[in-house]
DNA sequence: GCAAGGTC
């Protein structure tokens, strides 16, 4: 029997399809898919075989000194017992094994791990095949001429693992211990996350240090016949054109000169034609950046793309490649869109004489650029967001095979009272790829045809006082782009790194702003462990890995050298341990401080009760017992904005999709104290027996609800929207004897909420499927499939038999279902 | 429970 091992289940299935010419069947072993035909078996490792875990004796890491840890051996342990068990079972029966993991460094490492597992059982020959995309031709060719595992390349990857863990875990542990941060809120440091955080912190430092400067700009309206256009004043500054006037008196003088006349003479007209080339194929970074201009976060964009990939609509979304593989025939792919929602554009592209896709600079060996597969979803198959992202990917593919656009630029210079004015016009002559790719800006600026010497009227002159602006914060896609430029992180991890920085309380908002803690961590690292916050650590590691891969160094050389360097860092760190700890603790507190306590003058802080709920408490506790409530949903985040009335920072509650700004906790509490409950009808739970009635209530924590007047004896309640005025109408719901409610009745867009009980029931039904889609690893495309199989809410999923679900829903594995169920049990 | 790499 021949055993073929791939990196992921999906690849295993496709390779089996290709090699068996469609005759492969799948069976399950220990919950792992095995594809079989004849005497061949293909199994995907799902990336779980490789794993560096700490030895169990270090699991209680609070008691372990960091330095002991770094000298401790890093051991490898498989993280998914069932995958390993399956692999070993199959290996025992095989007389030959082929490693077919991804054609990159990490793929080689995963392949080597699999090789070692096989070697534990048997000494059958193990070969290695390499192909850059899972297409018929490439896979067949690779299997026709198998190669050997490159152990040096795998060792390079292993050195990376060890060094990352050594530095990351030891420094993380040191900072967390010194600041006594031991729960979920540990203080982490790492080779990729820390240089990324430093980018954000450095930019924030520039912004803080920025000293704005005043300047003035002058504009004039010029008019030819009845067509007006705007021109800007400029002057010669040592041979270059300058628009900003830095001296107020000089600006006023120019303004007076221009105002003294009401006409300008055209002194030069220049026309130029520019071609605007279509964009290159999507790699992960370019995709994230395009999706971000549609308003998607990096994480969200990737998770939608992964969902579309799993459903079979787009290619693998984690790729560096910007060159389509040779065997992608653009004509064939365009043909697939004839008769679809994209028919018109696809047909117009097919009419072109020559269809030659653009190429980017990066041609890699693992996966093709992101493009549609040719299997089309209908709008009903996917959520609105998924459709929007799918359309982006389709249109990007269209753009890469479309023609260039042509622009006509028109530059006009005119003189008035010896002062110069200029206007730049821009006209799209040939829309080219813009016709199929409406995302990149194609805005025109109209300047009429004028001729040299022509006299134009000048009805208005304006002077604008401005200030230089600090540099802008990096947005998420800009950060990911910069990480790629610096070589930090990989296509599969960059977006996760940003998410991690959010989760760790290092950054907040979008564009991300560093918290006080982040500033302190970067500062401490710069002083004592500069290596780990600089992108040079990655650069050096890359160089070392190349040396290992080329056989010029060994894994031991490189990791020993790194370990010695870390030991030296620790010698300095240990001396300053208390100082660093105090500083970090102070910074942590600064991120939780809301403002002065009105009762004692100490700081009011965001705190957490023993039950886990958040509230505002006084730092003077137990002497001062002043408190304020916070909403029950989400995690509080202190914003920069300060309430004018109470000198308190506003608070935002982070709760994923339901994130909202709570505002000033004192304002919210006072508003609730001043409002009165409005009775609207009988309580369905206790009216008959006890006479309880439902009322609209404002809670001190800022939320509103319909609750029983006998609370806490009766805790019947219905949710109400957080924002907007609520009006009670004269129309009554017959079923529940309650009035219908309207939110924001006086606005342009009032929302008829209706009877609160009916509304809540509809809400529950509507959200059942959405709740499914919200689970980790389920998107709306998969949720739709689950719903079709009768699994339409969380409770059904929780009780469902995982094997039945996996059998009935295509593309869903039993392991997945069990993971979802485990999530629900948490 | 700590990193970063993979995949789900």
Image (spheres, helix red, strand yellow):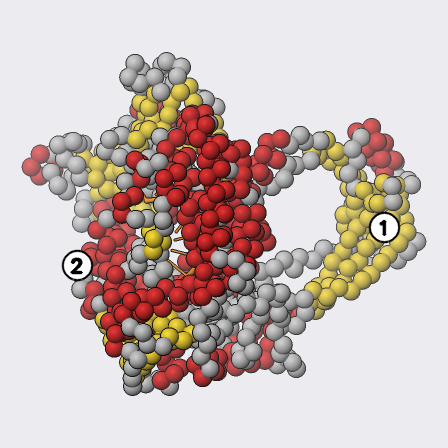
The residue at the point 34 percent across, 69 percent down is A44
Q: What residue is pinned by disc 2?
A: A799
The crowding category of the residue bearing disc 2, from other C-alpha atoms within 10 Å (few below 14, some 14 to 19, many at least 20), is few
Q: Nearer the viewer, residue A56 or A367?
A: A56
Q: Which mark is residue A413?
A: 1
The crowding category of the residue bearing disc 1, from other C-alpha atoms within 10 Å (few below 14, some 14 to 19, many at least 20), is many
In contact (CB < 8 Å): disc 1 and disc 2: no
A613 w.r.t. A377: above or below? above
**Co-location on one chain, circles 1 and 2:** yes
The residues tagged by marks 1 and 2 sit, at their Cα atoms, a distance apart of 75 Å
* Lower position in the chain sequence, tag 1 or tag 2: 1
Q: Position of residue A214 (x, y in %)?
A: 72, 31
The residue at the point 52 percent across, 58 percent down is A553
Q: Position of residue A129 (x, y in %)?
A: 44, 75
Give left or right: position of A451 versus A246: right
State whether residue A410 appears in this view.
Answer: yes
Q: Position of residue A164 (x, y in %)?
A: 44, 49
């Amino acid at each position: 029997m021949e055993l073929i091992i791939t990196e992921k289940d999906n690849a295993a299935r496709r390779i089996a399809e290709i090699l068996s010419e469609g005759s492969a069947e799948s069976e399950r072993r220990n919950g792992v898919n095995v594809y079989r035909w004849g005497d061949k078996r293909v199994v995907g490792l799902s990336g779980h075989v490789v794993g560096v875990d700490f030895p169990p004796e270090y699991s209680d890491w609070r008691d372990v000194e960091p330095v002991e840890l770094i000298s401790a051996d890093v051991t490898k342990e498989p993280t998914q017992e069932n995958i390993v068990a399956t692999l070993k079972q199959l290996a025992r029966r095989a007389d030959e094994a082929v490693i077919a993991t991804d054609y990159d460094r990490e793929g080689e490492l995963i392949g080597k791990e699999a090789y070692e597992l096989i070697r534990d059982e048997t000494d059958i020959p193990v070969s290695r095949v390499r192909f850059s995309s899972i297409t018929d031709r490439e896979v067949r060719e690779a299997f026709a001429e198998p190669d050997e595992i490159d152990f040096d390349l795998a060792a390079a990857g292993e050195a990376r693992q060890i060094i990352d863990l050594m530095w990351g875990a030891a420094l993380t542990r040191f900072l967390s211990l010194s600041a006594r941060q031991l729960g979920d809120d540990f203080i982490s440091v790492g080779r990729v996350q820390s240089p990324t955080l430093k980018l954000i912190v450095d930019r924030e430092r520039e912004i803080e240090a920025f000293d704005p400067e005043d300047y003035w700009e002058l504009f004039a309206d010029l008019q030819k016949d009845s067509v007006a256009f705007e021109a800007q004043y400029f002057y010669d500054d040592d041979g270059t054109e300058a628009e900003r006037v830095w001296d107020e008196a000089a600006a006023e003088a120019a303004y007076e000169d221009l105002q003294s006349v009401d006409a300008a003479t055209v002194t030069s007209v220049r026309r130029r034609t520019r071609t605007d080339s279509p964009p290159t194929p999507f790699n992960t970074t370019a995709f994230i950046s395009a999706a971000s201009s549609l308003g998607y976060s990096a994480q969200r964009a990737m998770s939608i793309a992964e969902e579309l990939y799993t459903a079979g609509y787009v290619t693998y979304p984690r790729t560096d490649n910007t060159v389509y593989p040779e065997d992608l025939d653009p004509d064939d792919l365009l043909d697939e869109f004839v008769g679809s929602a994209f028919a018109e554009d696809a047909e117009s592209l097919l009419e072109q004489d020559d269809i030659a896709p653009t190429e980017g600079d990066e041609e890699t060996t693992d996966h093709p650029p992101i493009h549609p597969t040719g299997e089309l979803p209908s709008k009903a198959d996917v959520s609105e967001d998924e459709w929007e992202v799918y359309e982006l990917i389709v249109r990007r593919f269209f753009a890469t095979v479309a023609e260039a656009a042509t622009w006509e630029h028109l530059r006009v210079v005119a003189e008035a009272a010896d002062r110069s004015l200029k206007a730049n016009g821009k006209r799209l002559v040939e829309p080219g790829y813009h016709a199929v790719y409406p995302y990149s800006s194609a805005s025109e600026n109209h300047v009429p045809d004028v001729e040299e010497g022509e006299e134009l009227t000048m009805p208005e002159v304006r002077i604008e006082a401005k200030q230089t602006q600090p540099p802008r914060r990096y947005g998420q896609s800009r950060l990911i782009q910069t990480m790629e430029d610096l070589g930090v992180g990989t296509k599969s991890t960059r977006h996760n790194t940003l998410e991690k920085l959010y989760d760790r309380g290092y950054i907040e908002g979008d564009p991300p702003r560093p918290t006080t803690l982040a500033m302190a961590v970067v500062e401490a690292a710069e002083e004592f462990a500069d290596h780990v916050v600089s992108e040079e650590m990655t650069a050096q590691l890359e160089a070392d890995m190349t040396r290992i891969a080329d056989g010029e160094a060994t894994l031991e050389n490189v990791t020993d050298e790194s370990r010695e360097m870390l030991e030296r860092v620790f010698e300095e760190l240990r001396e300053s341990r208390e100082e660093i700890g105090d500083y970090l603790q102070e910074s942590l507190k600064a991120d939780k401080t809301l403002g002065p306590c009105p009762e004692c003058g100490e700081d009011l802080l965001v705190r957490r009760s023993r039950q886990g709920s958040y509230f505002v408490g006084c730092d003077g506790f137990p002497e001062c017992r002043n408190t304020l409530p916070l909403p029950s949903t989400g995690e509080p985040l202190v914003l920069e904005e300060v309430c004018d009335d109470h000198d308190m920072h506003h608070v935002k509650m982070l709760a994923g999709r339901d994130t909202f700004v709570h505002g000033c906790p004192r304002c919210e509490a006072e508003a609730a104290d001043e409002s009165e409950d409005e009775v609207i009808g009988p309580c369905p739970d206790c009216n008959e027996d006890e006479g309880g009635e439902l009322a609209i209530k404002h809670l001190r924590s800022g939320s509103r609800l319909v609750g029983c007047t006998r609370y806490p004896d009766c805790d019947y309640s219905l949710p109400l929207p957080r924002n907007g005025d609520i009006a009670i109408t004269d129309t009554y719901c017959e079923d529940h004897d309650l009035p219908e409610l309207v939110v924001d009745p006086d606005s342009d867009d009032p929302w008829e909420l209706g009877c609160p009980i009916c509304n809540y029931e509809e809400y529950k039904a509507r959200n059942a499927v959405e709740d499914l889609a919200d689970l980790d690893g389920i998107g709306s495309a998969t949720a739709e499939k689950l719903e079709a199989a009768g699994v339409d809410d969380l409770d059904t999923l929780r009780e469902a038999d995982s094997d039945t679900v996996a059998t009935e829903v295509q593309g869903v594995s039993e392991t997945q279902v069990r993971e979802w169920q485990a999530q629900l049990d948490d």
